[in-house]
Image (spheres, rainbow, N blue to C red):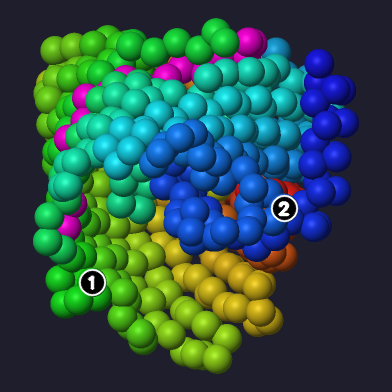
């Protein structure tokens, strides 16, 4: 099956070079805007797959994505991997194919369905379905009622809010993230507010075997714009209920509330983003008392090349005392990997500082260079993966090290938008391990290379 899908994908890549430029393709495909194609009397190329009439004021559209990503890892997780792994340094090919259909019935009803297949080649280490491979799944399938200022969406669906630090579609890994439940969206002057009651879909490796309704996620997320959309304020309250997560290797039932705000700008020269969350609730008999804060300030220094320099500071709490009645570990919920695919560290129990540069040296090419200086916030808590799985230290070494320095993480990301449908990317990163990885394991430096090509229509 893998070989057949691989051959079909090569044919699609060949067709990509002759694809017509199209309208806006969104990160979440149900938000695509092909209104110009709808009004076009003569459609060409793959535009013919958009707004196919199904009678009076009824339409069906088709779209999809093919992504090929070749990766090279050296010293996964600083050289410490489970016994089931064959290699700590490996290479692999990820392949993602997603096909969707959008059916609009009049002005108020629509149905959206998306199939997904993600495969991994060349790597003999165990497969992680949530990250690497989901051979075939019904990734999204929902019905939506659209009224003047209200939308009601029920079913399997992708979601993201703010800057992906709370809930995301998880674009970086091979398998994207979806949720199952109800989302209600209310639009008002200069803003929008969402209410949701969902459960994360658990990706499985094989055909149509995904699961949901294990965890609960209930919340309100609003955005208010000011100064002609030059500034915005997000505000949110989210209740997370789960038995899936462990803190210092202790399992139990978690009922965690996250309260937060995010202030951001969209000016010409100077921009900022400030975000803060506080978490309360219960984990077993422990009272949750955790936080996360972030500040990002950047300046446009080379307008002709969109040259930007900036600085980000981030802090998230870790548990302070294993013998007290509080849990101070910040829960990332379903956030994007804050430090990319190479770093085995999520943004909890951490303090990081990051200067960065963004530039558009030639048309269609974007470059981001940044370096993170990273340390543990508390020496009474370990480090957690972006999926909130504790990966340092081992249970036998818990609380054995007072070292905090995680190291320096150097990142280069490039994107070349060949056409509106074809994106080429090259990423490279190097993690110089600090004293804490060395004190709790092998502590080897990590290197990562990635070349990615994406075709969307």
In the image, residue 410 sits, relative to residue 222, either above or below, namely below
Instruction: Work out whether residue 36 or residue 249 is closer to the camera in this orientation and state it.
Output: 36
Which range of residues does the magenta coloring cover? 191-207
Left or right: residue 45 compared with residue 287:
right
Q: Secondary structure at mark 1?
A: loop
- Find residue 45 and name its label: 2
In the image, residue 65 sits, relative to residue 309, either above or below, namely above
What is the C-alpha distance between the residues marked 2 and 1?
36 Å
- Find residue 217 and name its label: none
Asked whether residue 417 appears in the rendered view, the answer is yes
Residue at the location (35% across, 85% down)? 268
Crowdedness of circle 1 by 10 Å Cα count: few (<14), some, many (20+)?
few
Asked if residue 206 lies in the magenta stretch, the reply is yes
Name the residue tied to disc 1: 229
In the image, residue 268 sits, relative to residue 449, either above or below, namely below
Left or right: residue 360 compared with residue 164:
right
């Amino acid at each position: 099956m893998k070989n057949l899908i691989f051959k079909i994908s090569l044919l699609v890549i060949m067709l990509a070079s002759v694809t017509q430029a199209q309208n806006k393709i969104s990160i979440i495909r149900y938000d695509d805007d092909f209104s110009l194609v709808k009004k076009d009397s003569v459609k060409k190329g793959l535009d013919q797959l958009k707004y196919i009439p199904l009678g009076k004021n009824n339409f069906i559209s088709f779209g999809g994505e093919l992504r090929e990503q070749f990766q090279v890892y050296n010293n996964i997780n600083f050289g410490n991997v489970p016994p089931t792994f064959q290699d700590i340094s490996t290479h692999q090919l990820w392949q993602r194919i997603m096909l969707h259909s959008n059916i609009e019935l009049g002005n108020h009803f629509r149905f959206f369905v998306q199939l997904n297949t993600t495969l991994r080649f060349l790597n003999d280490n165990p497969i992680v379905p949530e990250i690497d491979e989901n051979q075939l799944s019904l990734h999204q399938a929902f019905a939506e009622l659209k009224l003047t200022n209200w939308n009601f969406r029920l079913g399997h669906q992708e979601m993201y809010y703010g800057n992906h630090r709370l809930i995301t579609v998880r674009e970086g890994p091979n398998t994207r993230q979806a949720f199952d439940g109800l989302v209600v969206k209310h639009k008002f002057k200069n803003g929008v507010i969402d209410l949701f009651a969902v459960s994360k879909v658990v990706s499985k490796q094989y055909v149509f075997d995904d699961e949901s309704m294990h965890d609960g996620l209930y919340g309100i997320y609003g955005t208010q714009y000011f100064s002609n959309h030059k500034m915005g304020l997000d505000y949110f309250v989210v209740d997370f209920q789960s038995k899936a997560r462990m803190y210092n290797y202790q399992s139990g039932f978690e009922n965690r509330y996250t309260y937060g705000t995010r202030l951001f700008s969209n000016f010409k020269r100077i921009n900022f983003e400030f975000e803060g969350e506080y978490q309360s609730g219960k984990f077993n008999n422990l009272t949750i008392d955790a936080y996360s804060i972030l500040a990002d300030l950047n300046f446009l220094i080379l307008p002709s090349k969109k040259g930007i320099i900036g600085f980000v500071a981030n802090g998230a709490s870790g548990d302070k005392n294993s013998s007290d009645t509080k849990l101070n570990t910040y829960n990332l919920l379903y956030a994007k990997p804050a430090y990319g695919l190479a770093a085995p560290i999520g943004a909890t129990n951490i303090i990081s500082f990051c200067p960065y540069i963004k530039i558009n040296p030639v048309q269609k090419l974007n470059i981001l260079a940044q370096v993170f200086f990273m340390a543990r916030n508390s020496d009474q808590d370990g480090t957690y993966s972006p999926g909130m799985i504790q990966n340092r230290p081992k249970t036998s070494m818990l609380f054995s090290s007072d070292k905090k320095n995680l190291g320096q993480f150097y990142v280069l990301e490039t994107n070349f938008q060949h056409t509106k449908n074809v994106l080429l990317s090259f990423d490279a990163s190097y993690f110089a391990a600090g004293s804490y990885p060395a004190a709790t394991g092998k502590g080897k430096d990590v290197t990562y290379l990635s070349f990615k090509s994406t075709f969307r229509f």
